Image (spheres, rainbow, N blue to C red):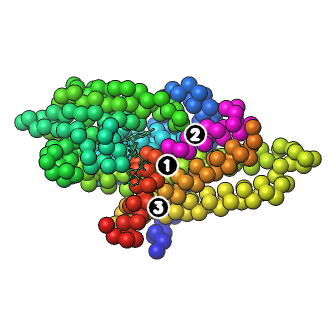
């Protein structure tokens, strides 16, 4: 069954937002993309640009400064990703690190954080992964010990996106390690809390302008009222967050794929071989047709998943997995084909498709690998 129709007002607002985003991407983001990749530097100017234009809190409820639309949000991430996957990740991580508060925060926590995250006054991050628990996230070792009105956190998180530029970080830790996943809790840490330290900086294949860091929690002491939900609800909060953040990764993948196809299609019209443009070669036309067909199919799945997030349906786990699996695989295939279509030039950093191919790969890995998405999907079809 398709997701419900939207109001004319929501559609008009979305059009306005997307017109703005397209202009910003054309004038400000696209010209910076190659440089961001080459230097590996976080584009603070782009983050500020997004903040000024109200792009950091689109899926947040309106009462906390957002637009209240996951569908508009994924379309924005898609548009930015056509030019620069690193820049799009700024918007996507702001959603990822705000979702636990939207899902499990009490009113005081929502009021304290969400409006500032929506405006960009505050930036966030999300720390679930540990050295020994990635896909097997429930196997985390970080602990949170209650001491009166405080919690003391100890442990190491790895691969945490944008924590180096964030003001807060949602940290998942075991309040009762004897209970397995039911012993995990979620906390809002401030990155200047005592004992919250940044560790190793990772050097990456793609999305090179997004800093990725180890986080060391060394007797990190935080007030007890920064716990999200009840003790023991952390794993549920972490998974409910991923259900709604995976469409953001899917949108990033889809945008990368569309950007690569658009570039390759222009190249084929211009590059002449054997006395005619490459676009006249039927073998290449068929490749382009297959790339477009895959992108269009992935887009329908993504928009359906995002609409279901908006509708608040119970099936977002399944749809989030479906769209991330499809869009991630399409991005990898389309960008690889785009490199092929450009021949030797496709392999050179002078052209953007090799960057797009490197950027595409991460969408098959983070926020649950493609194998994990298949497990989620199969569970719905076959049961646990
Ligand atoms: C650039 C980058 C940014 C990231 N950002 C964040 C972040 O901001 N916050 C955060 O918390 N995490 C982040 N991550 C972590 C990311 O989510 C994990 O790397 C990912 O979930 C995979 O975990 P792992 O690396 O431990 O791989 P593993 O879990 O060790 O998996 C290794 C391989 O085995 C496969 N596999 C594992 N279990 C199964 C199974 N049961 N069946 C079949 N195959 C299986 C996997 O699919 C994978 O191919 C980031 C990672 C990267 C690379």
First in sequence: mark 1 or mark 2?
Answer: 2
First in sequence: mark 1 or mark 3?
Answer: 3
Locate residue 255, reporting x and y percent: 58, 49
Q: Residue at x 23, y 38 (%)?
A: 142
In the image shown, does 313 or 358 lie closer to the viewer?
358
Tell which tag, 1 or 3, sits nearer the viewer: 1
First in sequence: mark 2 or mark 3?
Answer: 3
Locate residue 88, reporting x and y percent: 51, 41
Locate residue 192, reporting x and y percent: 27, 26
Ligand 1 position by quadrant: top left
Q: Residue at x 82, y 52 (%)?
A: 279
Q: Provide the secondary structure element on which disc 1 rests.
A: loop
Residue tagged 2: 358
Residue tagged 3: 322
In the image shown, does 307 or 126 lie closer to the viewer?
126
In the image shown, does 298 or 286 lie closer to the viewer?
286
Residue tagged 1: 364
Find the distance from the CA under tag 1 to the CA under tag 2: 11 Å
Q: Is residue 102 left or right of residue 15?
A: left
Q: Provide the secondary structure element on which disc 3 rests.
A: helix
């Amino acid at each position: 069954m398709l997701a419900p129709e939207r109001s004319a007002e929501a559609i008009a607002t979305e059009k306005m937002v997307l017109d703005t985003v397209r202009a910003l991407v054309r004038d400000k983001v696209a010209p910076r993309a190659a440089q961001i990749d080459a230097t590996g530097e976080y584009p603070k100017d782009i983050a500020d640009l997004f903040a000024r234009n109200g792009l950091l809190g689109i899926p947040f409820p309106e009462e906390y400064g957002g637009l209240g639309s996951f569908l508009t949000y994924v379309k924005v991430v898609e548009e930015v990703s056509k030019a620069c996957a690193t820049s799009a990740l700024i918007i996507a991580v702001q959603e990822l690190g705000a979702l636990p508060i939207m899902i499990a925060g009490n009113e005081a926590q929502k009021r304290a954080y969400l409006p500032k995250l929506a405006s960009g006054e505050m930036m966030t991050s999300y720390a679930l992964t540990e050295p020994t628990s990635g896909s097997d996230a429930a196997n985390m070792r970080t602990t949170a010990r209650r001491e009166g009105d405080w919690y003391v956190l100890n442990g190491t998180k790895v691969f945490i996106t944008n924590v180096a530029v964030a003001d807060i970080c949602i940290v998942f830790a075991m309040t009762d390690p004897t209970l397995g996943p039911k012993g995990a809790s979620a906390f809002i840490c401030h990155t200047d809390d005592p004992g919250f330290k940044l560790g190793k900086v990772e050097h990456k294949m793609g999305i090179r302008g997004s800093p990725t860091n180890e986080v060391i929690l060394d007797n990190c002491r935080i007030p007890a009222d920064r716990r999200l939900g009840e003790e023991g609800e952390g794993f549920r909060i972490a998974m409910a967050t991923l259900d709604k953040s995976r469409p953001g990764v899917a949108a990033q993948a889809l945008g990368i794929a569309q950007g690569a196809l658009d570039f390759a299609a222009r190249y084929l019209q211009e590059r002449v071989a054997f006395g005619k443009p490459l676009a006249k070669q039927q073998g290449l036309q068929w490749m382009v047709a297959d790339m477009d067909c895959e992108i269009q199919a992935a887009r329908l799945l993504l928009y359906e998943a995002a609409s279901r997030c908006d509708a608040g349906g119970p099936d977002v786990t399944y749809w989030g997995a479906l769209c991330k699996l499809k869009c991630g695989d399409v991005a990898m295939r389309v960008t690889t084909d785009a490199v092929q279509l450009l021949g030797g030039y496709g392999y050179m950093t002078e052209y953007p498709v090799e960057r797009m191919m490197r950027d595409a790969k991460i969408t098959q890995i983070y926020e649950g690998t493609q194998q994990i998405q298949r497990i989620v999907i199969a569970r719905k079809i076959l049961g646990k």
